[in-house]
Image (cartoon, grey):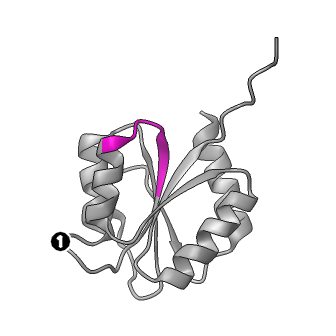
Amino acid sequence: MAALAPQRPVILIVEDEFLIRMATAEAIRDAGFQVVEAPDADSAIVILESRSDIQVVFTDIHMPGSMDGAKLAHAIRDRWPPVHIIATSGRYAIREDDLPCGSLFFPKPYNPDIVAQSLRALTAA
C-alpha cells in the first residue's frame, strides 16, 4: 500500500498588483506551501467560502474593491477564526489595533525568508 504524501499547508495570497502577487506566490511555493491567489478582498472571501483548507491569508493592505486588507483581516477573524493573517503594505504604517489580535505585519519590501519562517511557525500548530 502506497503511503500518502503529506499535505502542504495552503496559503491564500491577496494582492492586486499582479507582478507582486506572482513573485510572492512563487517564493511561498518554493518554501514548500500550496498557494491560492486572489486579486482583491472580494475574491478572497469567495475562495474562503468555498475552501476549508486555507490556513493563512497573506494580504496587502491597500487594495481596490469593497474592502481593503485591514477590513478583510477583520472579516476573516470574525468568520474564520482559525485562519492566520499576515498583512503587508508599502504605503501604510499599521497601528496595533488596525489588525485583529494575533495578526502579523510585514512592511514592503519584505524578506521572503522571514515570511517563509513565519508561515512555517503559523502552520506548525
Q: Which residue occupies 68% across, 58% down?
A: 29
- Count numbered badges in the picture: 1
Q: Which residue occupies 41% across, 36% down?
A: 52
Residue furthest to the front: 1
Splitting the image into 4 quarters, where does residue 73 fall? bottom left
Residue furthest to the left: 66
- Nearest the viewer among 72 and 100 is 72
Looking at the image, residue 83 sits to the left or right of residue 112; the answer is: left
Q: What stretch is highlighted in magenta?
A: 50-57
Q: Mark 1 points at which residue?
A: 66
Q: Position of residue 112 (x, y in %)?
A: 69, 70
Confirm whether the magenta stretch covers residue 60. Answer: no
- Nearest the viewer among 62 and 10 is 10
Q: Which residue occupies 74% across, 66% down?
A: 113
Looking at the image, residue 41 sits to the left or right of residue 1; the answer is: left
- Nearest the viewer among 2 and 111 is 2
Q: Position of residue 79 (x, y in %)?
A: 25, 42
Answer few, some or many: residues within 10 Å of disc 1's Cα (few below 14, many 20 plus, some between 14 and 19): few
Q: Is disc 1 placed on a helix, strand or loop?
A: loop
Image quadrant occupied by the C terminus: top right
Q: Judge whether 35 appears above or below 59 on screen.
A: above
Callout 1 amino acid: Ser
Q: Position of residue 85 (x, y in %)?
A: 44, 54
Residue furthest to the bottom: 91
Q: Where is residue 119 in the image (x, y as percent from the top left)?
A: 62, 52
Confirm whether the magenta stretch covers residue 56. Answer: yes
Can residue 97 be seen here? The reply is no
